[in-house]
C-alpha cells in the first residue's frame, strides 16, 4: 500500500504545477493585454506545448490578436490555433539542434517586429536553454553542442552550464529582452532551477545577466576544459573579456518583467497535503537540495535509519519530502539512467534488505524525464530487494556502473509517466511505516 501512496503523493506534486492550472490565474491579472494591438507569444521549454494550449484557452476572445512561436521537444506538440509549436530537439535529449537554431531565429525575428502597441508574452520552462540554441557570431552549433556535452559529463550545475551557454548565445542572457521593440514584454515562468533565479531559468532570455565572459571562462577552467574547447569558443571568450563583444545586459528596460508562476516549492506543498491526507506525518526538506546524488542518498538513508530505530526526527508513519536537483558525475563509459534512478538505487544499496523493511522510496523528475531515458525515475520497497535477489542482481554493481535504468527495468520498478507538460525539477518521497501497517489510510 505504501507504494500506491508514494505514487499518489508524487502525482499530486506534478498536478499542482500543470500549466492548465497555473496560466488562467495569471492571465486574468494581465490587463495590459486588453488594449494590445497584437499579442506576440514567444517561448521555449518542456512545458511549452501545455503552456501554449492553456494560454490560448485563457485568452478567450483576445486570441484573434495572437501571433506566436514556441520551441518544444519533439513528441510534445498539441493542437493550437494561433501559436506555432516548433519541435526543436528530440524528446529525451538536452543537446541543441539545427531545428532549435531555426526556431530560435524565428523567435528573435518576431520580437524585433513588435510595434509600439504590441505586448509580448513569453512562456519559459525547464529545458528552454537547450531549445534556444542560437549561437553568437563566429560560434557554430557543433561548438555549442561539444561544450554543453562536456559540461554535463563533468557534472556541472545548471547555473554553471547556463553561465557558459549565455555567453555563446545571441538570444540568451537577456538578449531577447533587449531585442523586443514593443510596448511591454511579460515572461511567465515555470521554474526548474533551485531558488528560481530568473537569469538561470531557460538561460534567462528576458532577464538581466549577472555573469560575465570572465565567469564563463573560469567555469571551463574549473572543469579543466579551457584548453579542450574548440578554438572558436576560446577566442570568443578571450575577445569578450577584452571588451570586443558586448556583455550580456546587466539591466533591462522597465517594460520587461518576469514572473515565476510555478516552482518546486509549490509542488512540494501539494505533495505534503496529499501525504497528510493519507495519514503520514511529514518532514518537508524543501526545494534547495543539491549535491552529488549518491551523497544525498547516503544522508537520506541515515535519516531513515534514525526514524526506524529512534523515532528521530519523527516516529513512523512518516513521509520525507524533498525537491531540488542533484547531479551525477559520469565517467566516459557508463550505463543508462538519471539522477532520480541513481538516488533510489543508492538508497537501496545503503539500507540493504533489512533496512528497507517498511520503507518505500520514490524519486522522479516532474517533467517525466530522468536523464536520456524514457523513465521519470524509479520506486523501490522491500519487495524490490526480493525481486532483484531472485534475478541475481546486486544494487552495488549497477551503482558502480551508473546503470540504474537496467537494474530497475529488470525488476519492473521504473516510473514511466511520459511527458507531463510541466517541469519543476525533482520530487523525492521516502515513506517509513511500521512493518505491520497495511491499512489503505495510515493509522499505525
Image: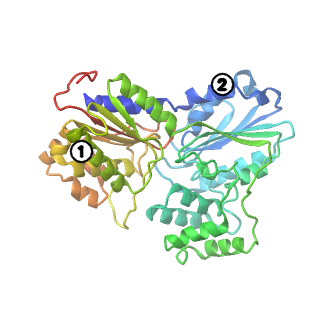
The label shown at residue 109 is none
Q: Residue at x 66, y 53 (%)?
A: 102
Count of numbered marks = 2
Q: Residue at x 52, y 55 (%)?
A: 158
Residue 26 pos. (x, y %): 65, 29
Choose between 396 and 218: the one closer to the eye. 218
Residue 289 pos. (x, y %): 44, 48
Crowd around label 1: few <14 · some 14–19 · many ≥20 (10 Å): some
Left or right: residue 200 versus residue 33 is left
Residue 223 pos. (x, y %): 49, 70
Left or right: residue 155 versus residue 62 is left
Image quadrant of residue 78? top right
Depth check, mark 2 against mark 1: the one in front is 1
Q: Secondary structure at mark 2?
A: helix
Q: Secondary structure at mark 1?
A: helix
Quadrant where the image shows the C terminus: top left
**Which residue is farthest right?**
116
Q: Earlier in the sequence, mark 2 or mark 1?
A: 2
Left or right: residue 404 versus residue 388 is right
Image quadrant of residue 336? bottom left
Q: Residue at x 19, y 44 (%)?
A: 355
Residue 317 pos. (x, y %): 27, 30
Quadrant where the image shows the N terminus: top left
Image quadrant of residue 80? top right
Tell me the residue that label 1 is attached to. Answer: 305
Left or right: residue 333 versus residue 41 is left
Tell me the residue that label 2 is attached to. Answer: 58
Residue 75 visible, this angle: yes
Q: Give the CA separation, mark 2 to mark 1.
A: 48 Å
Amino acid at each position: 500500500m505504501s507504494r500506491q501512496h508514494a505514487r499518489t503523493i508524487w502525482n499530486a506534486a506534478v498536478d499542482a504545477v500543470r500549466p492548465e492550472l497555473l496560466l488562467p490565474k495569471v492571465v486574468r491579472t494581465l490587463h495590459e493585454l486588453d488594449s494590445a494591438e497584437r499579442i506576440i507569444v514567444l517561448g521555449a521549454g518542456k512545458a511549452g506545448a501545455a503552456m501554449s494550449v492553456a494560454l490560448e484557452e485563457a485568452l478567450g476572445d483576445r486570441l484573434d490578436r495572437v501571433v506566436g512561436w514556441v520551441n518544444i521537444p519533439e513528441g510534445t506538440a498539441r493542437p493550437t490555433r494561433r501559436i506555432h509549436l516548433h519541435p526543436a530537439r528530440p524528446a529525451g535529449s538536452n543537446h541543441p539542434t539545427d531545428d532549435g537554431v531555426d526556431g530560435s531565429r524565428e523567435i528573435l525575428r518576431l520580437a524585433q517586429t513588435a510595434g509600439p502597441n504590441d505586448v509580448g508574452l513569453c512562456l519559459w520552462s525547464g529545458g528552454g536553454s537547450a531549445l534556444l540554441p542560437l549561437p553568437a557570431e563566429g560560434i557554430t552549433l557543433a561548438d555549442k553542442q561539444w561544450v554543453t556535452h562536456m559540461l554535463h559529463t563533468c557534472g556541472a550545475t545548471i547555473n554553471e552550464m547556463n553561465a557558459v551557454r549565455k555567453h555563446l548565445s545571441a538570444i540568451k542572457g537577456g538578449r531577447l529582452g533587449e531585442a523586443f521593440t514593443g510596448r511591454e514584454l511579460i515572461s511567465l515562468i515555470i521554474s526548474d532551477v533551485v531558488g528560481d533565479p530568473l537569469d538561470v531559468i531557460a538561460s534567462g532570455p528576458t532577464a538581466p545577466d549577472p555573469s560575465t565572459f570572465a565567469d564563463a571562462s573560469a567555469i571551463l577552467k574549473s572543469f579543466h576544459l579551457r584548453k579542450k574547447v574548440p578554438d572558436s569558443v576560446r577566442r570568443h571568450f578571450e575577445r569578450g573579456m577584452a571588451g570586443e563583444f558586448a556583455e550580456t545586459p546587466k539591466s533591462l528596460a522597465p517594460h520587461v518583467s518576469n514572473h515565476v508562476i510555478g516552482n518546486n516549492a509549490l509542488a512540494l506543498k501539494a505533495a505534503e497535503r496529499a501525504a497528510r491526507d493519507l495519514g503520514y506525518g511529514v518532514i518537508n526538506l524543501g526545494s534547495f537540495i543539491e549535491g552529488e546524488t549518491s551523497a544525498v542518498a547516503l544522508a537520506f538513508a541515515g535519516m531513515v535509519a534514525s526514524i526506524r530505530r529512534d523515532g528521530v526526527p519523527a516516529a513512523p508513519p512518516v513521509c520525507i519530502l524533498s525537491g531540488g536537483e542533484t547531479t551525477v558525475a559520469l565517467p566516459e563509459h557508463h550505463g543508462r539512467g538519471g539522477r532520480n534512478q541513481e538516488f533510489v538505487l543508492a538508497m537501496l544499496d545503503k539500507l540493504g534488505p533489512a533496512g528497507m523493511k517498511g520503507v518505500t522510496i520514490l524519486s522522479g523528475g516532474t517533467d517525466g524525464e530522468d536523464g536520456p531515458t524514457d523513465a521519470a525515475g524509479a520506486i523501490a520497497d522491500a519487495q524490490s530487494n526480493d525481486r532483484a535477489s531472485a534475478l541475481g542482481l546486486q544494487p552495488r554493481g549497477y551503482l558502480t556502473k551508473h546503470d540504474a535504468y537496467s537494474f530497475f527495468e529488470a525488476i519492473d520498478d521504473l516510473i514511466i509517466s511520459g511527458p507531463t507538460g510541466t517541469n519543476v525539477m525533482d520530487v523525492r518521497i521516502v515513506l517509513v511505516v511500521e512493518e505491520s501497517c497495511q491499512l489503505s489510510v495510515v493509522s499505525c
